[in-house]
Amino acid sequence: MVTGLLGLAPATAAAEEFDETVVEDVNDERIEAVNADIETINERIENADDLELVDEVDATDWDEAEVEADRLRETPAALEAAMFDAVVDEINARAQETPLGKIANDVSSPDEARAEADRLRDDYGTLGGEDIEEAAQSLETAADLSQSFEEKLLTGAGELTPPETGTLEGTVTDDDGDPLAGIDVDIVGSSAATTTGDDGQFELETPAGEQSIHVEADGYEPSDETVDIATDEAASVEMTLSEADDDSVETTDGDSISGFGLAVTVGTILAVVGLGFRRRH
């Protein structure tokens, strides 16, 4: 176990804090698109019950998001069944007004819907003309929409699933091998971050996969390492920080000061020092 301040293990930082914009994106880009198509279907269905719209996702943490993700995974099958029933009922209701009577058989999958469309053309094409073609196209459109609904909703479910994670343990020392406390440790491109304890050690939860580890502190040159993090496993890294080179400074008021590739005046030197020249990737 990696120990930190007061000899205790430092708090493990979450690999990915829940970002509610994920919910907004799923609602705006996935569910809204599905519901727009459902509303179009409902406008054209006259002899069957309207299809129910998909409820928007409501989640404020990963646990709630996973529950909503499960709901989205279950929705396509129910939506598909309701849509195929409505389309077949509508076709047959309209066909009852013609000498043909009931013409469409029940379907339960996109493949069956397309096969039924072909059968309608083969069996009734010469008799029903444009009406049969419209019925066949309705089944084919329903098949396409079914697959589109599934793709959008399953994609949304995936976006609501927390990323796989592993654990990164490490030590940060100076050039002499002495531990450095209070050093910022970041996973580049992630919200995962922590600081080292008095013993220079740290531990944090991080997304699985190849991750770039960025370490920096005032007075030291930043350092980066790449570590492969396996899901539900611990990886370790040892990092060394070298002291930053001192640049020459003249203290005469108004004289320029050379440092870090910048030209500043004494009037701004305190502001520059205050920034600490921290660089983040």
Image (spheres, rainbow, N blue to C red):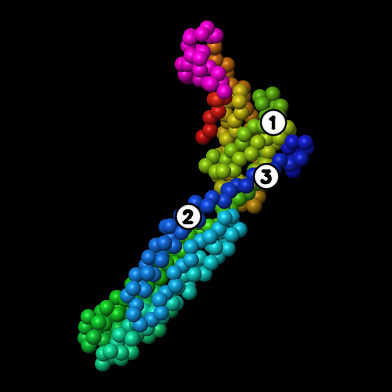
Of 107 and 92, nearer the camera is 92
Which residue is most to the bottom? 99
Q: Which residues make up the magenta segment?
A: 250-274
Q: Quadrant of residue 241?
A: top right
Give the structural element (helix, strand or loop) at label 3: loop
Helix, strand or loop for disc 1 = loop
* Marks 1 and 2 in Cβ contact (< 8 Å): no
Q: CA distance from mark 1 to mark 2?
A: 39 Å
Left/right placement of residue 278 relative to residue 9 reads: left
Q: CA distance from mark 3 to mark 2?
A: 28 Å
According to the picture, the residue beneath numbered tag 3 turns out to be 12
Residue 143 position (above or below residue 22): below
In the depicted structure, whether residue 44 falls above or below residue 229: below
How far apart, in angstroms, are the residues tagged by discs 1 and 3? 16 Å
State if disc 2 and disc 3 touch (CB < 8 Å): no
**In screen coordinates, is 195 left or right of 278?**
right
**Residue 73 percent location from the top left of the image:** 51, 66
- Circle 2 is placed at which residue position? 24
**Location of residue 79 in the rendering, given as x and y in whole percent from the top left corner:** 45, 73
Q: Which residue is denoted by mark 1 in the rendering? A: 181
Above or below residue 80? Residue 244 is: above
Could you tell me the amino acid type at mark 3?
Thr
Amino acid under disc 2? Glu
Secondary structure at numbered mark 2:
helix
Q: Residue furthest top?
A: 252
Residue 138, position in %: x, y?
A: 32, 76
In-image side of 200 versus 97 (left or right): right
Relative side of 51 to 99, left or right: right
> Given this view, does label 3 or label 2 mark the residue nearer the observer?
2
Is 99 colored magenta in this rendering? no
Q: Earlier in the sequence, mark 1 or mark 2?
A: 2
